[in-house]
Amino acid sequence: MARLVGGLEAGGTKFVCAIGTTPDDVRAEARVPTTTPAETIRRAVAFFTEQASGTPLAALGIASFGPIDLDARSTTFGSITTTPKPGWQHVDLLGPLRRALGIPVAFDTDVNAAALAEHRWGAARGVSSVVYVTVGSGIGGGIVLGGRPVHGLVHPEMGHQRLPHDRARDPFPGVCPHHGDCWEGLASAPALAARWGQPPETLPDAHPAWDLEADYLALGLANVVLVLSPERIVLGGGVMTRASLWPMVRARLVAVLGGYVSSRALGDGIESYVVPPALGERAGVLGALALAQAAGGLEATAG
Amino acid sequence: MARLVGGLEAGGTKFVCAIGTTPDDVRAEARVPTTTPAETIRRAVAFFTEQASGTPLAALGIASFGPIDLDARSTTFGSITTTPKPGWQHVDLLGPLRRALGIPVAFDTDVNAAALAEHRWGAARGVSSVVYVTVGSGIGGGIVLGGRPVHGLVHPEMGHQRLPHDRARDPFPGVCPHHGDCWEGLASAPALAARWGQPPETLPDAHPAWDLEADYLALGLANVVLVLSPERIVLGGGVMTRASLWPMVRARLVAVLGGYVSSRALGDGIESYVVPPALGERAGVLGALALAQAAGGLEATAG
């Protein structure tokens, strides 16, 4: 029988806390609004401590917004680092939870965790490499290769890649405080809202916003394909809930690559290459459970 | 004692064939000009057959120019696919060598092999992830992660990523037959030659060509850092033999990232983050030996 683990998705607007073993066996869940670090972390600690007092937890996984410090040799391992979110720079997430619970705690980015959950239980089962990209309040990407999230110097930050930006067609300067017109700066939900002066969900399908958006998403995904060559791309986030955007993004990704990468997946097979998350908005917190299982050496029992 | 293996670097201008165990123990080497597939492959087969008639080879590694088919389930596994090189489209490299030699044959891209050689014996020893980028007659990149070359849908083709291209500053349309102004189209040696009307090696250090070149190289490397977050980048190829280009590329890479990725490697440590290959032009053929050792299960003896 799979042992119980905890999963914490630490997001910019809410912390989602869960206890369970698999997507079909989540036994308790709580949502804590993201206010100050002290209050938010205290409430998360309280949830897990209370839950663990009933049935002990084998491990905890934390899937956090970033950038974060993933280097286990670093003195700030387990912290959020240079986030623009006020008050949350250089906040230690891992420390307080590990001290309170006294169990192994795994720590990774929310998008690496989502990629892991989709690989284990969702839209990327059976492939050896998957990239999970979310297009919402920002653009972020995680990578799972051979069953494991990819770290490295730090962790992927693919939302900040630079793309062609035709200022004659789109004079909008971009919203990224660091880079201006990087991918996130041009194509996240806040970029859409700022460029068009209204929330993206209020723009009709026929609005020229979507044409431009599809082009930027295709350019960014093409670079991901060219740099890493993943076997599947799972594309989530609020912006991707617009159904009419999907065929546009897929067609333009094929067009941008220009037939250079020889694979059916980038032709006839594009609909099963760039796919929506099977776990929807739950990918993050379920990924945190998957991280916990890896930390607790419980992967074989994860179903 | 390490068993003898063969390595073949199949390049667009020459095939380099070698027999050995490590960079310090290459026992025979031959260079065959790349003419027709039939003649070139016949001469490579002759070299290895002759060598193996003395001391048997445990395995052969092939490090090929691309794109190539790396999918072992494919009917065209071991072939070059959509290369623009005349006469070399859909040429089976692996088949003739395996049939002639009757030993395990490993097959990968020249740049994945170079990354593997630099990881095992060169400038990327001791890191968990390395990207090898070559800037010469084209731009190509290979990835080694956890000691293994990265495959996926196909293999990395990072030279074809799209970058910002300010046509007011640089009206040159690019030389890539597939994409025009992709990274390779803007910044390879043929792009430099076509833009400035003279071979890049004849351009003085003070020529504005190098300013633009450094910007394009930094933009492409920045995207590699953001998508994959490698622990080190090894940067080779003919264009990088220009010493004055190195400090420019490093400084601009740091500038493009704008401090967003928190790592000393992308600040004070940049000189040991983006480094020249320790194996120089031998990285490809030595990588082929390393591939052979992996294929023959001889990694532990590889030194």
Image (tube, coloured by chain):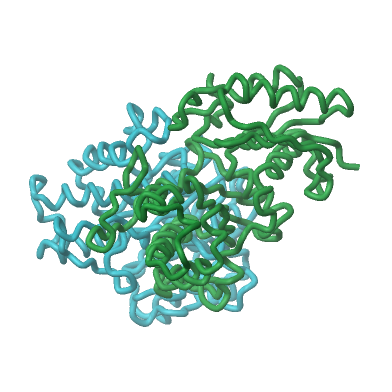
Chain colours: A green, B cyan
Of residues A217 and B135, the one nearer the viewer is A217
Q: Position of residue B290 (x, y in %)?
A: 52, 52
Q: What residue appears at the point 15 percent right and 63 percent down from the top-left corner?
A: B171
Quarter of the image where the N terminus of chain B is located: top right
Q: What residue appears at the point 50 percent right and 26 percent down from the top-left corner?
A: A88
In this view, A73 is above or below B76: above
Asked if residue A289 lies left or right of residue A94, the reply is right
Of residues A28 and B78, the one nearer the viewer is A28
Write down the quadrant of residue B24 in the picture. Answer: top left
Asked if residue A6 lies left or right of residue B169, the reply is right
Of residues B217 and B120, the one nearer the viewer is B217
Q: What residue appears at the point 71 percent right and 44 percent down from the top-left corner?
A: A286
In this view, A106 is above or below B287: above
Q: What residue appears at the point 56 percent right and 54 percent down from the top-left corner?
A: A131
Write down the quadrant of residue B86 in the picture. Answer: bottom left
Q: Is residue B283 visible?
A: no
Q: Position of residue A216 (x, y in %)?
A: 39, 60
Q: Position of residue A28 (x, y in %)?
A: 81, 37
What is the tally of numbered marks visible in this picture?
A: 0
Of all residues, the one furthest to the top in this rendering is A99
Q: Position of residue A37 (x, y in %)?
A: 57, 23
Write down the quadrant of residue A64 in the picture. Answer: top right
Of residues B200 and A249, the one nearer the viewer is A249
Q: Is residue B125 visible?
A: yes
Of all residues, the one furthest to the right in this rendering is A1
Quarter of the image where the C terminus of chain B is located: top right
